[in-house]
Amino acid sequence: MSIAGTQSAPPAWRLLLDYVRPHRWALLAGALLSLVTGGTGLLLPLVARGLIDDLSHDRTITGALLAMSALVVANAALGALGSYVLRRTAESVVLGARRKLSSYLLRLRISAVDRSEPGDLMARITSDTTLLREVTTDSLVGLGTGGLTLVATVVMMGIVDPVLLGVTLAVIAGAGTVLTLILPRINRASRQAQDAVGVMGASLERILGALRTVKASGAEDREERTLHAAAEESWRQSVRAAKWSAAAGNTAALSMQVAFITVLAVGGARVATGSIDVGTLVAFLLYVFYLMQPIQQVVGAITQYQTGTAALSRIQEALQLPAEPPSLPAQLPSPGAEPAALAFDGVRFRYADDLPYVHHGVTFEVPAQGMTAFVGPSGAGKTTVFSLIERFYDPESGAITLDGRDLAEWELSGLRSAIGYVEQDAPVLSGSLRDNLLLGNPDADDAAVTRVLKTTRLDGLIARLPKGIDTLVGHRGTRLSGGERQRVAIARALLRHPRLLLLDEATSQLDAVNEAALRDTVADVARTTTVLVVAHRLSTVTMADRIVVMDAGRVRAVGTHRELVTADALYAELAATQFLATTG
Ligand SMILES: Nc1ncnc2c1ncn2[C@@H]1O[C@H](COP(=O)(O)OP(=O)(O)OP(=O)(O)O)[C@@H](O)[C@H]1O
Ligand SMILES: [Mg+2]
């Protein structure tokens, strides 16, 4: 899947610096510690020389020995501290990216989620952020320390002999040209490897989310092939990236060998003509030798940076998906709050610009209090009405008002806190029954929970379970029956004391006894709240205060059951096929 953003992204290094900036002092400290460790390492030979000196002059060596031990211990301690600080900083960068991304994903617009694969988004949070770790420590620190050493060495070379420096730089420039050809390939391969990890996440999520269906369809082998294909693609691209990284590393090594030979040849000639003496040539060759490590380090850093920025661009794409504006959490309505009034006026809506209209000018009014039912054939746009009320989507034209105020003028959290919504497939989240019930109102007290369990007839179930309300329900509530899941979802919505209750086929899986009981509960709630229900079984809505008949994205008729059976042909037909008395 690709979720390429439309805006042009800032350059990768700027993005990377944004992530690193909060930790710049720690990073600097780590880099300094590493430098100091290197420095104390360099002191060791001097102390050793002193020790040998002392020995040869028959002096006591205790002082030199102590100094050497102290140096070794300090070196090890500083080295450990340095790598700990760097590693910790890198992890903090990863944490920062994960925090930012996960907060953002929770605010994504539903329309953006519709077009993405959750598994791929998951891979961006878990796997791509991990790649930032290396790019922070190895790459940035390597570039810093390696770069510094490189500059210092080049300066020294310039002092020793500018001509030979010119020769060396020419060779390095040649290698640099080759590297500029290789680096984009590393970047592209890393990007494709990470994309393949995303594809794998998406197929995994798809399969694990519906493993029963996959098994029942005997599709394991085919699904296995898809998974393996994604894993192999990631392997292929990672190997490609490894190949180019190896090429980059060896180009650097090769260039140094070439530089060595060229300097030897050119320098030899210069010695022969008397331009420089042998000592200068030897010193210069030593510097060429010293150049090797920082060059390897810098090239390694740049190579690493390619992988990091590939991951960074995937993270950035997710951060460019359309999101809802941030809004402060809103208070839930208090139990006795006024019911809400709702109106749709000429609402036209489609899920995307390239999809057909789902609502062609939907108009209806729902006064505060009472029960309004939405009926109509499958695909008529009933669930879409609810999605628009929750502002999961915005209509293209027309207006939706709650309490006479356009939805667009509501603070999103304020709007949603007024509403209790039971979705068509009554999702239950992994966790305990209690977690699920309190999801919409974490402050509900035990008395309220007990009351709601009773009205939704879940008290029997809870009494039967060994762990009662703390029983775990499994992924998407698979350890509950369909009807139990629906009742948990209703209880959850009721606990919010909503001013507007939306029930989408909320009792479709209940047995007749439970359904009748829930019908009474809902009728009861409708005395103090505005209740909107979608139902295919007309028997559940015949007593509604008004019924809105929808067909193909339009409202056909509004009235009571008694009025509609005579006034609307579609409703009469629905009623007749469901053996309801057409005379009311
Ligand atoms: N997220 C979505 N993205 C694109 N199209 C969608 C989306 N959700 C629904 N649709 C389309 O919108 C139309 C109306 O769907 P909606 O869910 O509102 O119907 P419904 O009246 O609730 O049907 P049912 O009785 O089967 O639940 C359908 O044709 C459906 O294919
Ligand atoms: Mg529906």
Image (cartoon, rainbow, N blue to C red):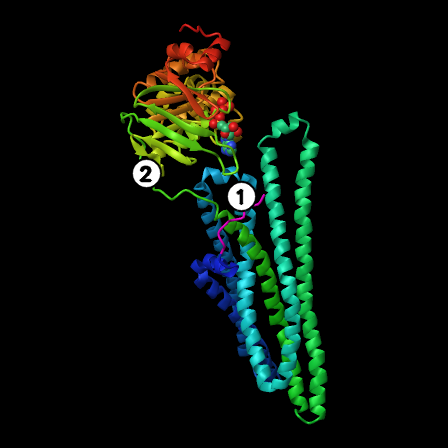
Work out how far the residue at label 1 is from the one at label 2, CA to CA, in angstroms.
Answer: 31 Å
In the image, farthest residue toward the bottom: 274
Residue closest to the eye, 575 or 84: 575
The crowding category of the residue bearing disc 2, from other C-alpha atoms within 10 Å (few below 14, some 14 to 19, many at least 20), is few
Task: List x then y, in percent, for residue 174.
Answer: 66, 73
Q: Which stretch did the figure color magenta?
A: 1-9
Left or right placement of residue 148 versus residue 453 in this view: right
Indicate whether residue 244 is drawn in magenta.
Answer: no
Q: Residue at x 38, y 26 (%)?
A: 363
SS at mark 1?
helix
**Which residue matches tag 1?**
121
Q: Quadrant of residue 103?
A: top left
Task: List x then y, in percent, for residue 376.
Answer: 46, 19
Task: List x then y, in percent, for residue 535.
Answer: 45, 18
> In the rendered view of the protein, which quadrant contains the C terminus?
top left
Residue closest to the eye, 345 or 97: 345
Picture disc at residue 167: none
Q: Residue at x 36, y 29 (%)?
A: 345
